[in-house]
Amino acid sequence: MPEVLKAPLVVEFPFTRSLGPVQSAFLTGLRERVVLGVRTRDGRTLVPPVEYDPVTAEELGDLVEVAPTGTVTTWAWNHDPRRGQPLDTPFAWVLVRLDGADTALLHALDAPGPDAVRTGMRVRVRWAAERTGAITDIACFEPYTGATPPLTGHDGHFDDAVTGIVAHARLDYTYSPGRAQTAYIDALRGRRTVGERCPACRKVYVPPRGACPTCGLATSEQVEVGPRGTVTTFCIVNIKAKNLDIEVPYVYAHIALDGADLALHARIGGIPYDQVRMGLRVEPVWAEGARHPDHYRPTGEPDADYDTYRELL
């Protein structure tokens, strides 16, 4: 049995969203060192503010300033901060009910150790040196024993309000493809495509998963398929992906390799994007030293009859 593979992988993307009037005022206020909440019909002040009352679902928009000081309602110590967290030294995650608010705000508390943190302790906002209109404009909270500072009297209206934010999402993890996909990847090194056959329904799945998705039975019988196949469905990509050196537009397609009962996806090349079609017969193109096909190109054969691949759509 070949060695099971594993590799570190990163999924990362910028998430862009627009802001409604409530969130816009809240984040713009942080930029100006003002903390805003929203008042409900029954007089509660919610911080962070929301656009709809979580109890009545009524739309909210009555902005009200609260103090940058508050009380810890609960906490947990973070012994090992991760990349991108508010502080790079051990700190406490705290829920803080700011003075004038009826709900708690989650953020970091800069404290020398867990013995210095307790429920009920008083804290205040430590503002970031550079503020852009984001929750990170609050660098963290810090212990505080002074009086509640006076409010600025801000009404929540700004001339240059923040209208959108970009949040950078990232997930670092180690992926192991398992026995079946490890064998599949090993076969690709020899420019062969190998699937596995279900012992019950006899369907061949490529790439294999180690079990039949229909019958639920373990699979182990290897079957070589392809290398040619048929385009079943496809899409035209018009947005260029970061770090992907492929000019748009290009085509990604589901390809049913000869002998397989499951279509895999791959890029189509060697043909104008607007000439790719269902039923197109294709073959793999390998780059020198590559561990998988770079793309698939037309074979020049007549298109496959629809009935030969309709069950694979």
Image (cartoon, grey):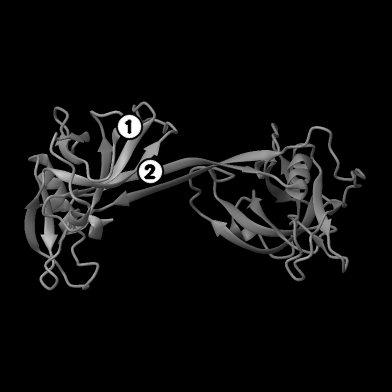
Asked if residue 147 is positioned above or below residue 213 in the image, the reply reads: above
Q: Residue at x 40, y 36 (%)?
A: 237
Which residue is nearer to you in this view: 199 or 288? 199
**Between 287 and 45, the one nearer to me in the picture:** 287
Report the residue at 24% width, 67% height from top.
Answer: 213
- Vertical placement of 58 versus 307: above or below? below
Q: Position of residue 265 (x, y in %)?
A: 27, 46
Q: Residue 99: x, y in percent?
A: 83, 57
Residue type for callout 1: Tyr
Type of amino acid under label 2: Val
Q: Position of residue 32 (x, y in %)?
A: 79, 37
Q: The N terminus lies in which quarter of the figure?
A: bottom left
Q: Nearer the viewer, residue 198 or 30?
A: 198
Residue 60, located in which quarter of the rendered image?
bottom right
Q: State which quadrant residue 313 falls in.
A: bottom left
In the image, is residue 73 above or below residue 173?
below
Q: Secondary structure at mark 2?
A: strand
Q: Of circles 1 and 2, which is in front?
A: 1
In what element is the residue under mark 1?
A: helix
Residue assigned mark 2: 10
Residue identifier under label 1: 273
Q: Is residue 3 visible?
A: no
Classed neighbour count for the residue bearing mark 2: other residues with Cα under 10 Å, few (<14), some (14–19), many (≥20): few
Q: Residue at x 86, y 41 (%)?
A: 157
